[in-house]
Amino acid sequence: MKKLVVSMMMAACVLLGGIPAASQDYTGKNVKEVQLVGLERVNDQVVRSKLEVQPGQPFNSRMVSRDIRRLYELGYFSNIVADASLSGDDVVVTYTVEEKRSIDEVKITGNRKVKERAIRGVLTWREGDSFASEAYDDERDAILKLYQSKGFPSASVDIIVEEIGASRVRITYVINEGKKARVKQITFVGNETLSEHKLRKAMKTKHAWWFLGGKYDPDVFEEDLGRITDEYGNYGHLEADVENTDLAFSEDGKRVNVTIYVKEGPQYHVDTLDVAGNVVYDTDEIIDKMKVIPGEVHNKSQVEKDAETINSGYEDSGYVYAGVTPQVTLDRENKTTHIVHRVREGDLKYIREIKITGNSITRDDVIRREVLSFPGERFDGGLLRASQSRLEDTEWFETVRFTLENLDDTEDGRFSNLLVDVEEGKTGYFNFGGGYSSDEGLGGFTELTFNNFDISNWPKFSGGGEQLRLKLNISGKRNQYNISYTNPEFMGYPLIFGVDLFDERYEYDDVGRYTEDTSGAQIRFAKLLSPFVTARTMLRYSDTSISDLPWYAGITYPREYWDGREGSTTISSIWGITRNTVDTQKDTTSGSRHDLQFEFAGIGGDNNFYKLEHDSTWYWPLDDNRKWILSFRTREGWVDEYGSSDYVPLQDRFFAGGTNTIRGYDSRDVGPKKTGLWGLGETVAIGGELRLLESLEVKYRLNKLLRLYGFVDSGGVWETASDLDFGDMRYSAGIGLGFDIPRMGPIRVDYGFPLNADEDQGNGKLHLQSGFRF
C-alpha cells in the first residue's frame, strides 16, 4: 500500500507548483472515505464542514493542502498530518490532528502580601484559553515585575503545568515572595553643587521613616535617575550624568542602602536667545514673556516652561495648532548655550460648531451654557480651559474632554468643530459634618443635594443642571431645616433664579442661655456679567424670636436678649457681586475669590438696619508641582441701625469664635459681653456692629487623597465701629488633616489652639467636616 504524507510542507509545495511524485499515483482516483483521527474536544462536524475533500469525488492533492490550511485557521490544532492510502481502486484520506491544550484551571499559591486579584491582572493565561508553552517566560516576568513594583526584589516564581485530561492542563504558579525591601538610606557621591537634600527631593524613591514609606520600586528608581539629571539641568549642569548606582541589600532582604554616583559636569550660562518662525507676534514681544534670558544660568525646565508660555499665548489667540520647540546648542568651550524657540504658528482657527457627546442624562443646552466659547468666534485657549473648569466644578461628570474636529477639505480651512465629550457621573450627595468641643460636645448635620436636578423631567427629575438641596441639622443644641432650589437659566433667559425656605432653632448656653427661633423665605436672582463675575440680588423675609430665657433675664440679661422675647420680623433686600478666578472649586491651588454684599433692612417688618460684608481669599502655589499652597482669607462686616430702630437685633449682629471664624475658641466667645441691669447677672455675648477676621493657611498635598494643613486665625468683634481697638484681636493656630474618599467626598479634621485667650475662653477645639457621595 502506498501512502502519501500531506503536511504543511506539501501544502507549500503545492502552492509553489511542485507536487510530490508519489501523489501522482492517486490523482483522478475516487475518494472512498475521509477519516479524522485525534479529535477529543473539537466537534467532528465542525472539522468536516471545513474540508474540501469529500467522498465520491476525484482525489486532488491541492485540495488536501487547502484543507490543512483551513483547519489550521480554526485555531484548535497545533499539528495536522494528512495521509492518503488505497483501498481497492479508491483512496482513503486520513487527517490526523493534535489538538491545542486548553487551560482548565489556574492556581496561585504562596502569595501573602500581594492579592491574588492583582497577580491575575498581569497574567495572560486564563481558564479556557489555549495553552502556549512559549509564554512561560512572559508569565514569570510579569509576576516578578509586579512584585518588584511592590517592593519585593527577591521574589521568585515557579510555573507547574499538569495534564489533567484530554488536552487539558492545570497551571500552578508557586510564588516565593521573599522579603519586602525598604530603602534605609540614599547617599550621593560626587555631588558638590547640589546638596543631597535637593537631589533626594527630586526623586520619588524616598527612604523609610520609621514604619512609613521607603518602598523600593526598580522602575521608579530608574526614572529617578533621569529626574536627578533633570534637576542638575535646572542649575545649568546640562551634561550631568549618573555614572553608577549601588544597591546594598541586607541579609534578610528587608532593607536596601542606595548609593548614587553622579558626575556634575560644568555649569552653562545663556549666551543668546532668539525666536524663529514667528510672524503673528514680534520677537521682542515674545522674548518679554520669557524668564530664561541671556546672562543667566541655563535652567532646563524653565526653558521648557517658556516654550509652553509662548504656545499658550498662541492658543489663546486662536492658533490652536501652534507648536513651540526650544532648540539648545552648547558651546562647550565657553560653557554657554544658544537658545532658539522655533515656532510653528499654524492657521488661525474659528469655531464652526460645538458638538456635545457622551451625555446620556444632562441636556445639551445645559452643557452649552457652561461653555464660554461660541460658534463663529475664534478659538481661545484661555476660555476653553475656563470652560473645562466650569464643567468639572459642576460635579455632574466624571471626565470632561475638549478636542477639535477638522472639517473636510471642501470646507473652509479656517473653521473646526469644537467637540465636548463628557462622561456622566453621580450627581447626588449625602453630606454630613460634625464638630466637638469641651463645651458643646458632639453635633452634626445631614444634607441631601441633587446637583443636576430637572423639575420638569418627571419621573427622573435629572439632567437640567438645576439644584435641589434638603438640609437637616439636629444636635443637642441645633435643629435646622432648609429647602433650597436653584435654576441657572430662568424661563430660558441667562438669569439664575432660586428660592429658599428655612426654619432654625438654636439653644445657646455658653455665652448666654436662651433659644433663638428663626423661620422665613427668600427669593434670589443672579446674572453672570463675565466668565468670572456674577451679580446677585434677593428679597428675604425672616421672623425671629428669643425664648427660654431665665425668669430673671429682665434684670440679669442686657436688653438685646429680653427685647427679642416678643419676636420681630425683618424684610430686607440684598445686593452682592462675586469675582471668582480660582483654578478649581475643590482643592484650589491658585487664583482668588472675592465677594461683596450689601443688605438693606426696613422695607417692611420691625427692624431697620444696613449691613455691609466683604469676603476675599487668595491662593498661591509655592512650588512648581503645586504641592505647597498658601492661602489668605480676610472678612470684614459692618452693620448699623437707622430710622426708628435704636439698636441692631441680636440675630443680625456679628459674632466670632468657633469653627467658621476663629478656630480654637468657643463659639461666639470672642467679642463684647455685657451683664444685666446695674451690673447684675451673668456675662453674656451681645455680638457687635463691626467684625474683622483673617486666616492664613498653608496646605501640603501629600498625594491626590491626603493633605496636611497649618493655619493661623485672627479676629475681633466690637460693639460699635467707634470701639475698634486692634488690641482686642484674638489669635489662634492649629493643624489639620484632610483626605478624600473616592466617590464619596472630602473629610477634614482641624484642631485649633487659642494663643491669647482669656481664662474663660477654653483651651482648644476639634473640628470635623466630611461628606459622602451616592
Image (cartoon, helix red, strand yellow):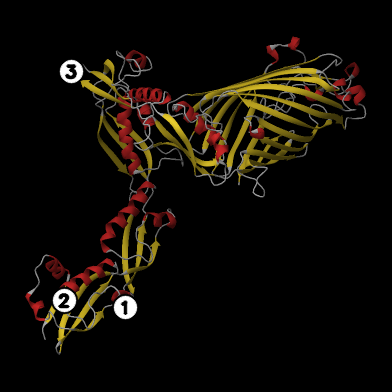
Is residue 132 placed above or below 763 in the rendered structure? below
Query: Residue 235: percent from the left, percent from the top?
Result: 32, 22
Query: At x 34% / y 13%, what residue is drawn?
Result: 284
Q: Considering the numbered disc 1 on the image, is that residue within a helix, a strand or a loop?
A: helix
Task: Return the residue at label 2.
Answer: 60
Q: Judge left or right: residue 87 versus residue 454.
A: left
Could you give the CA–CA distance between mark 3 and mark 2, rounded to whole angstroms? 79 Å
Q: Considering the numbered disc 3 on the image, is that residue within a helix, a strand or a loop?
A: loop
N-terminal of the pair, mark 3 or mark 1, is 1
Could you give the CA–CA distance between mark 3 and mark 1, rounded to whole angstroms? 79 Å
Are there few (<14), some (14-19), or many (20+) residues within 10 Å of tag 1?
A: few
N-terminal of the pair, mark 1 or mark 2, is 1
What residue type is disc 3 on? Glu
Marking on residue 631: none
Task: Return the residue at label 3.
Answer: 333
Nearer to us of marks 3 and 2 is: 2
Occupied quadrant, residue 126: bottom left
Name the foreground residue: 150 vs 518.
Answer: 518
Query: At x 28% / y 16%, what residue is drawn?
Result: 273
N-terminal of the pair, mark 3 or mark 2, is 2
What residue type is disc 2 on? Asn
Occupied quadrant, residue 672: top right
Task: Return the residue at label 1.
Answer: 44
Query: Residue 168: percent from the left, percent from the top?
Result: 33, 72
Image quadrant holding the N terminus, namely: bottom left
Q: Considering the numbered disc 2 on the image, is that residue within a helix, a strand or a loop?
A: loop
Query: Residue 329: percent from the left, percent from the top?
Result: 22, 22
